[in-house]
Amino acid sequence: MEFSVAVERIGIPALCVVLAYGVWCLPQDVQAILVYQRSGVEQGEYWRLWTAHLTHYSLSQLVVNVGMFSVLLYVLRDELAVPYVFLGWSICVAMPLVLLSQYLWVDGLLEYRGISALVAMLWVWFFLGVVQTSRVYSGRFFLASAALLGFILRMFSDGWQGATISELPQGVSIAWQAHLAGGCCGLFAFWLYAYHKKGACSL
């Protein structure tokens, strides 16, 4: 029983790591079919709205993004008891929404790679959940609030082309608008799950 529980808790985040690394190992011409390209979407290649999140510019970007994504996925399940099924559906819906928002409102974004927008989504979702479940003015409450404030400040920093811990090719800048869209998806997912829990409790 303990083994099956461990597989359930760790298996999905581990699978995400394997999947992202598997895409990284694909030939460049295959990866080119998966990345978000504005011109490709205009030609009806809508799968890019999903697959682009699995592609990365560099190994350091892959390690940082997928590492944070997997940890946040795990703690949402472990600390806040959000089922992986709900997480999975929320992520699958958010993936195209994030890049559709960029297509509609950011004309200059011609290409996008990375799972960082989904990291932003899970970050906002998790720390809003921590704030909700913490005693007001407790250390946990303040730490979660600081993490949310840090996300907002990071948006300003990225907008001014702030430093990044991931290695990006020359000429590639941080798509802070995608991170903002991811954060908005996290806010909505948090509200939707809270509403779902409230409805389940009232039955």
Image (spheres, rainbow, N blue to C red):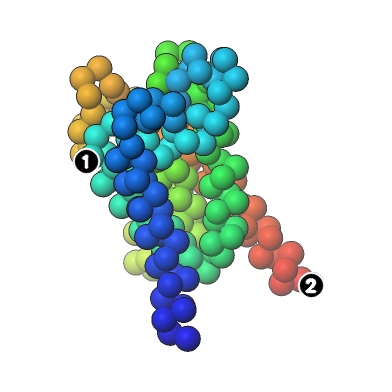
Return the x and y of residue 202 as percentages of the image width and height. Answer: 76, 71
Question: Residue visible at 25% across and 17% down?
Answer: 171
Q: Is residue 39 left or right of residue 66?
A: right
Above or below, comparing residue 73 to residue 119 in the picture? below
Return the x and y of residue 192 as percentages of the image width and height. Answer: 64, 53
* Disc 2, SS: loop
* Residue corresponding to mark 1: 60
Q: Is residue 72 visible?
A: no
Amino acid type, residue under disc 1 in the picture: Ser
Above or below, comparing residue 159 to residue 76 in the picture? above
Return the x and y of residue 154 as percentages of the image width and height. Answer: 33, 37
Q: CA distance from mark 2 to mark 1?
A: 47 Å
Q: Answer with mark 2 or mark 1, whichever residue precedes in sequence.
A: 1
Which residue is more in the foreground, 133 or 183? 183
Which residue is more in the foreground, 135 or 101? 101
Nearer the viewer's eye, disc 2 or disc 1? 1
Return the x and y of residue 54 as percentages of the image width and height. Answer: 41, 40
Residue 150 sits in quarter: top left
* Residue corresponding to mark 2: 203
Q: How many marks?
A: 2
Residue 138 sits in quarter: bottom left
Amino acid type, residue under disc 2 in the picture: Leu
Q: Is residue 66 left or right of residue 38?
A: left
Can you name the residue that lies furthest to the right here? 203
* Disc 1, SS: helix
